[in-house]
């Protein structure tokens, strides 16, 4: 009648040869709850709780409600999810969230139990087998231990392995304290069962910690508590009455830490809250100690050496067919390679987010091997995963790693063979070009490596004048400097006035595997005539076409589709909001500027992790691109090259 069958996605249960899903059990539980409610048994609360359990069983198993979704998801404590090729199924479960809530509730229950009087008859029973001082000591110790357990709940949510170990130890201690302090069997059973469930889900807590961090914490945390104790003893001594002895002051300090009443009243109205101050100080030190103890492995901060940069540059030259691939060679990016070093991603870490620049680059088999390693790296270090400037092809890859996609705008790519200044539609660009030519301006194109030091210095002076002292911005779609060691093969189109002085330039990086270049940045002196940028782009396309380049990637236009071809009421409303906000963010103006050259638009996506991870990843992206100033208190010293 009953048969259990092993399956790669979880155990399957069959009754009379029919597969039993969780939603079947959920419907049965709902029916049972309805019967209890109809018969009026147990009151209204138990049937309601049983009914909610049934609804949860149905909701979490919704994939199995349809034939196409059956056997496509793995069992989870939370909502069932489809397995992903680049992310182990255990890393998709909801155990940490449930564990955090459960442990927090257990800690609160134990805390309330510790600060409330015992049931009288249970206290009488305990007094026959243990001294009163033991009972009182267990009551006192249960308070800070409950607080400590409450603190670990947050780190359990963050999947910290060491938090799991500490929580289990604290719950074991509380189980004993609950029995010893007042024969509180209910609290003891609740705590023990929660600890057993936490142990059963231990594989979900995989964020590791460096051994050095533990050694450091083992001396820092006691030193921190010792300093706090000395400061607290001093405060209590000042606030204590003159008749209090040194032993009374030590005992009063200990009682304050254990949230017990000291053996004396503090002197003076202004010092009456000294006990509360000591208690709050203890909580603060507890939080600091938890941070020191539960911090994950620190991600490497040293930038890649020259050998690794050569490997990355070689992969880009062999496989960098995406127009943003070359930008991974910025000197401020870290790299993660697969084992064979046939594929890599460029990334930086901000706001606890490992932000990948564009698509992975490399052999297809290498990328398939690399992405699970990137996921594992982020998880070991307690980081969220995100990617900025991802193509449609890259979006598919990252979705297989569990990331969500947000359309962020379009890349404007001009077909140089089809580009022309003829026709009414492009007349404004043609007028700018004609006006600048009459003013004596001309353009030159050259590889950056072929330019003399004086020319490069002049280009840097033009860029400095345009930026007004602000450093170069960018992360995924711009180079960091003209001095980048791999930039010798990049192209510069510069405008020279009638006196032979360079007044503006465009910097293009190559795209390997196709006859394409990508605009890194465009700079001009501020006092140059209007239309110089249009003149540079139009002339630059002509130069590039003569050199065999068929595709020219221009600026990225944020949310261009919402302005160009909105879909539905929501996108039209967002498009209007972008027009209104153009005075601050120049989104519409940048789109209109790109549209002058009649490009084709290729969408780019922002990939982020988890339903509520967009805000955190979005702040990290804005910091990296230089669109949002980072608070000074959060700024770190530059990493070493």
Image (cartoon, rainbow, N blue to C red):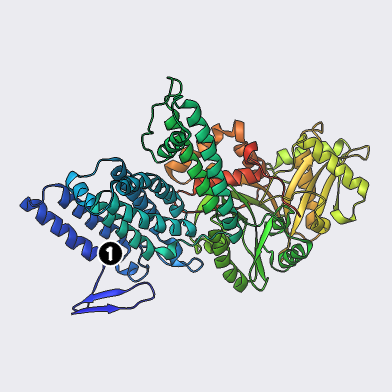
Where residue 111 sits: x, y (%)? 33, 44
Where residue 587 sits: x, y (%)? 60, 39
Q: Quadrant of residue 360?
A: bottom right
Where residue 213 sits: x, y (%)? 59, 56
Foreground: 246 or 195? 246
Q: Secondary structure at mark 1?
A: helix
Residue named by callout 1: 65
| Residue at x-position 61% and y-position 31% | 583
Any part of residue 369 in sight: yes
| Residue at x-position 56% and y-position 33% | 581
Q: Is residue 89 above or below residue 524?
A: below
Q: Quadrant of residue 324?
A: bottom right
Q: Residues within 10 Å of mark 1 (few under 14, many from 20)?
A: some
Where residue 556 sits: x, y (%)? 64, 47
Foreground: 540 or 430? 540
Quadrant for the N terminus, please: bottom left
Residue situated furthest top in the rendering: 269
């Amino acid at each position: 009648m009953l048969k259990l069958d092993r399956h790669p996605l979880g155990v399957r249960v069959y009754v009379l040869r029919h597969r039993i899903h969780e939603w079947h059990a959920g419907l049965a539980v709902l029916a049972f709850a309805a019967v209890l409610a109809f018969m009026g048994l147990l009151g209204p609360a138990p049937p309601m709780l049983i009914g909610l359990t049934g609804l949860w069983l149905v909701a979490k198993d919704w994939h199995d409600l349809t034939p196409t979704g059956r056997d496509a998801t793995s069992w989870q404590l939370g909502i069932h999810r489809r397995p992903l090729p680049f992310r182990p199924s255990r890393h998709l479960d909801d155990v940490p969230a449930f564990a955090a809530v459960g442990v927090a509730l257990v800690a609160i229950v134990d805390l309330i139990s510790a600060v409330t009087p015992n049931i009288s008859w249970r206290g009488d029973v305990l007094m026959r087998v243990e001294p009163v001082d033991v009972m009182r000591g267990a009551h006192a110790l249960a308070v800070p231990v409950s607080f400590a357990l409450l603190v670990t709940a947050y780190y359990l949510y963050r999947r910290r392995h060491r938090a799991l170990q500490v929580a289990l130890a604290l719950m074991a201690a509380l189980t004993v304290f609950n029995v010893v302090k007042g024969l509180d069997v209910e609290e003891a059973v609740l705590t023990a069962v929660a600890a057993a469930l936490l142990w059963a889900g231990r594989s979900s807590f995989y964020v590791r910690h460096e051994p050095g961090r533990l050694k450091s914490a083992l001396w820092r945390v006691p030193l921190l508590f010792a300093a706090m104790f000395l400061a607290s003893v001093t405060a209590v001594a000042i606030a204590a009455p003159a008749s209090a002895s040194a032993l009374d002051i030590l005992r009063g300090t200990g009682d304050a830490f254990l949230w017990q009443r000291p053996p004396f009243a503090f002197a003076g109205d202004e010092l009456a809250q000294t006990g509360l101050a000591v208690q709050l100080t203890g909580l603060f030190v507890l939080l600091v100690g938890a941070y020191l103890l539960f911090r994950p492995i620190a991600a490497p901060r040293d930038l890649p050496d020259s050998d690794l940069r050569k490997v990355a540059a070689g992969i880009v030259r062999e496989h960098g067919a995406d127009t943003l691939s070359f930008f991974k060679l910025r000197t401020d990016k870290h790299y993660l390679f697969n084992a064979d070093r046939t594929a890599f991603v460029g990334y930086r870490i901000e706001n606890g987010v490992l932000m990948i620049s564009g698509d992975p680059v490399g052999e297809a088999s290498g990328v398939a091997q690399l992405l699970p390693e990137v996921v594992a790296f982020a998880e070991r270090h307690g980081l969220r995963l995100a990617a900025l400037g991802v193509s449609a092809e890259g979006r598919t890859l990252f979705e297989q790693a569990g990331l969500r996609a947000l359309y962020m705008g379009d890349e404007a790519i001009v077909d140089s063979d089809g580009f022309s200044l003829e026709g009414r539609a492009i007349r404004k660009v043609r007028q700018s070009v004609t006006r600048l030519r009459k003013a004596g301006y001309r353009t030159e194109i050259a590889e950056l490596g072929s330019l003399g030091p004086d020319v490069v210095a002049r280009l840097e002076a033009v860029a400095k004048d345009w930026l007004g002292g602000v450093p170069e911005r960018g992360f995924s779609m711009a180079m960091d400097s003209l001095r980048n060691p791999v930039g010798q093969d990049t192209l510069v189109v510069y405008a020279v006035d009638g006196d032979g002085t360079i007044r503006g330039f465009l910097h293009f990086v190559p795209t390997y595997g196709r006859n394409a270049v990508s605009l890194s940045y465009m700079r001009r002196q501020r006092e140059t005539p209007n239309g110089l940028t249009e003149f540079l782009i139009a002339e630059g396309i002509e130069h590039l076409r003569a050199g065999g380049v068929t595709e020219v990637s221009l600026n990225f236009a944020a949310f261009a589709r919402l302005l160009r071809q909105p879909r539905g009421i929501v996108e039209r409303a967002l498009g209007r909001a972008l027009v209104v906000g153009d005075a601050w963010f120049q989104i519409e103006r940048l789109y209109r500027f790109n549209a002058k050259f009649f490009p084709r638009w290729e969408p780019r996506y922002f990939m982020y992790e988890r339903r509520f991870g967009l805000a955190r990843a979005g702040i990290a992206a804005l910091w990296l691109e230089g669109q949002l100033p980072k608070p000074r208190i959060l700024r770190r010293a530059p990493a070493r090259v």
